Image: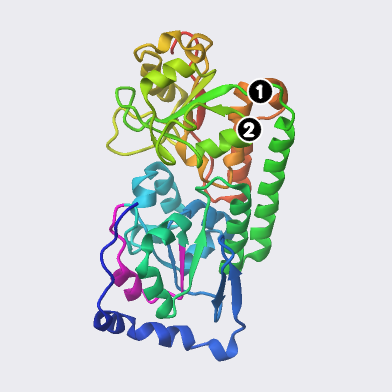
Amino acid sequence: MSRLPPRLPRRALLALAAGVPTLARSHVARATPIVVTDVNGRAVSLPRPPERIVLGFHFEEFTAVAGPAGWEKVVGFSRALWAGWRPASFIRYQAVIPRLADMPDVGNTEDQTFSLEKVLSLRPDLLILADWSVKQLGPQLAQLEALGIPVVAIDYNAQVPERHVASTRALGQATGNTERGEALAQLYAGKVADLERRVRDVPTHPKVYIELGQGGADTIGNTYAGTMWARIFDLLRLQNIAAGHIAGNWGPLNPEWVLAADPAAIFIAGSSWVNRPNAVRTGFDATLAETRTSLAPYARRKGWAELSAIRTGQLFAIEHGLCRCLPDYAAMGYIGKQLLPDRFADLAPEEELRRFYADWLPVPFSGTWMARLTADGT
């Protein structure tokens, strides 16, 4: 867990927050209070519809619920978590939401740059953060709330369907888009229920392995247990070979155990990371040829030629961002289709993803997000 800077001195807090209470109270008398139930079941009271929002993460989910117009009320965000982690995505959204280019950056808890001072200087009347970020804030969260700045937690990382649904409803309530949030929540719940129905009585539970492909085949990347991709495997009733073999929720798996477990399929999570020349390339800008070329070195790892997954052509690339988002059901469908083809034959996972973008987001879907390395390695 990241360690944050110590809490600000009381005198500094009072000086920075001088304008915050005035802003928060200015329309209370003539506005109807809003109660938002966040992902943790906390009833967060907003004295009026928020006009100055600071957003920490889950930017596309915010956009799906609030629409591009919702960004007119955002006064600051954690830039690195979007522009740095998924630059191909950020560039496209910046084209349709130009104010993203100059929007103030409040830092983030992941790399210990989150600035309470910067947040207060923006005079927000709502702070929306990923639940993992809320937990990392520690005493700074109490400082914010003491200054009258409501904090709403949302969570798509845990890969718990009920938390996806609760987070989507919370975004709808907080941004004044309750009907749109409810429609998305019901869409998601329905998609997941269909997936669960398909695997409810599967007689076999194939072994599967996933690895973060950020450093390339010469680096053993993180795998997952109990969260993110691991939760997707659990939902599909697949055997995650990392379960019980890594410390915590993510970390590298012993290469010898991968060989001994002999998974039926291997997925390498890629993205559009910057300054990662050996990474598996997926996402908006990736062509199928580029994705396969960046994936091919994994098939040549020491000992992997004898793995069932490699011998049967079951090595895949998949966009890492799909394990913590609203349309993650497209990734679930893709994984299920590879390992349980009889149960998922009628699904078209890429079309599911394309439809989500067309219906709910302001940027068109493009690129390669899920791909299989062909038998000849090309």
For residue 276: magenta? no
- Pointer 1 local density, CA inside 10 Å: few below 14, some 14–19, many at least 20: many
Residue with the mark numbered 2: 236
Q: Is residue 331 visible?
A: no
Q: What number is the disc on residue 38? A: none
The colour scheme of the drawn protein is: rainbow
Q: Position of residue 46 (x, y in %)?
A: 54, 77
- Pointer 2 local density, CA inside 10 Å: few below 14, some 14–19, many at least 20: many
Q: Amino acid at mark 1?
A: Leu
- The residue sitting at 60% across, 81% down in the picture is 33
On screen, residue 367 versus residue 351, left or right, reads: left
Q: Could you tell me how far apart the alpha carbons at marks 1 and 2 are, in whole angstroms?
A: 9 Å
Residue with the mark numbered 1: 340
- Closer to the camera, 235 or 288? 235
Is residue 106 shown above or below 161? below
- Closer to the camera, 45 or 86? 45
Indicate the secondary structure of the residue bearing disc 2: loop
Indicate the secondary structure of the residue bearing disc 1: loop
